Image (cartoon, grey):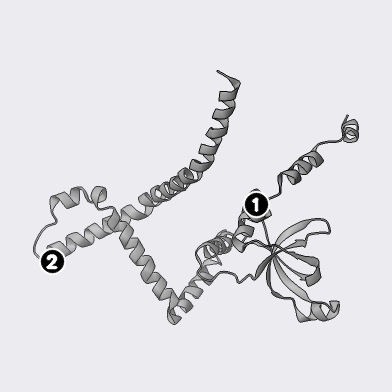
Amino acid sequence: MSKGFITDFRRFFLRGLIALLPILLTFALIIWVVNFLYGPVIQPINRWVLWGVSYIWEIYGGTTPEFIEDNWNRFFWWVGVLAIMLFIYIFGRLVASFLGRGIWRLMEDGFLRLPVVKQLYPYIKQVIEYILSEKKLDFSRVVAVEYPRKGIWSIGLVTGVGMSVVRRRMDADILSVFIPSSPTPFTGYAIMVRRDEIVDLNISIDDALRFVVSGGVIVPPSSQPTQLELQKAVQASLPTNKTKETIA
């Protein structure tokens, strides 16, 4: 087998893997979630729905057909899924109401008094709200700031004008900037920076969040380095003769 074929096979195999793996992992995650919910959630609800169907059938003077009772979980499992979706919808309507919102707040306060739960629940809620909430944080633009010290540049999202006290003390325009952390950009640090100490980046907020989540691996197309810049970066990362002597 020639060396060229092995190199060619490896190159195209990796390309195919990069293309297919995200799709396969997405479907695998969906299947895992469905299987995880099927036993403890969907099956019990299906049994309750079957009980309700049988009860209604008896009221009207009949018995549930044997085919339905024997094959309910096999052919009618989707009824439980629809029932869950309907319940979540009704629950959402209740929580959105004035009375329901107050009751739910009281329940959450009691929930947060439980040991262990109070350490986990706030962070899980924050993640879910960030992913599913219709109200996204209102960021105006993406910038680069020297944070946490001079010489280290971090991605930042401008959120507004800095506090007036700081602006008066510094006698300069101050901006509030949110520094998202990797790999969870919904957490981070809120800092205030002088306007003349930030660098505006010509990238979208989605591109900035992808950069943060990937740990800097996914670089926006408009900001990707040229071939010459890559060669210089590789050469700069190689140990010099002086460094080799020091290591030896």
Question: In the rendering, which numbered label is found on residue 59?
Answer: 2
Q: Are marks 2 and 1 in contact (CB under 8 Å)?
A: no
Inter-mark Cα distance, 2 to 1:
64 Å
Above or below residue 92? Residue 227 is above
Looking at the image, residue 147 sits to the left or right of residue 95; the answer is right
| Front-most of residues 32 and 194 | 194
Q: Which residue is mark 1?
A: 219
Looking at the image, residue 238 sits to the left or right of residue 66; the answer is right
**Amino acid marked by disc 2:** Ile
Quadrant in which residue 49 is drawn: bottom left
Looking at the image, residue 166 sits to the left or right of residue 180; the answer is right
Residue 143 seen in render = yes
Above or below residue 115? Residue 40 is above
Query: What percent of the width, then of the height, locates residue 43?
Result: 32, 52
Query: What percent of the width, then of the height, locates residue 103?
Result: 46, 76
Residue 220 seen in render = no
| Front-most of residues 44 and 2 | 2
Pick whichever of labels 2 and 1 is earlier in the sequence. Answer: 2
Question: In the rendering, which numbered label is found on residue 64?
Answer: none
Above or below residue 166? Residue 86 is above
Check disc 1 and report its element: helix, strand or loop: loop
Query: What percent of the width, then of the height, locates residue 24?
Result: 46, 43
Query: What percent of the width, then of the height, locates residue 142?
Result: 67, 65
Residue visible at 59% across and 24% down in the picture: 4
Residue visible at 78% across and 71% down in the picture: 195
| Front-most of residues 199 and 192 | 199
**Amino acid marked by disc 1:** Val
Quadrant in which residue 81 is drawn: bottom left
Looking at the image, residue 97 sits to the left or right of residue 240; the answer is left
Residue visible at 35% across and 66% down in the picture: 87
| Front-most of residues 111 and 170 | 170
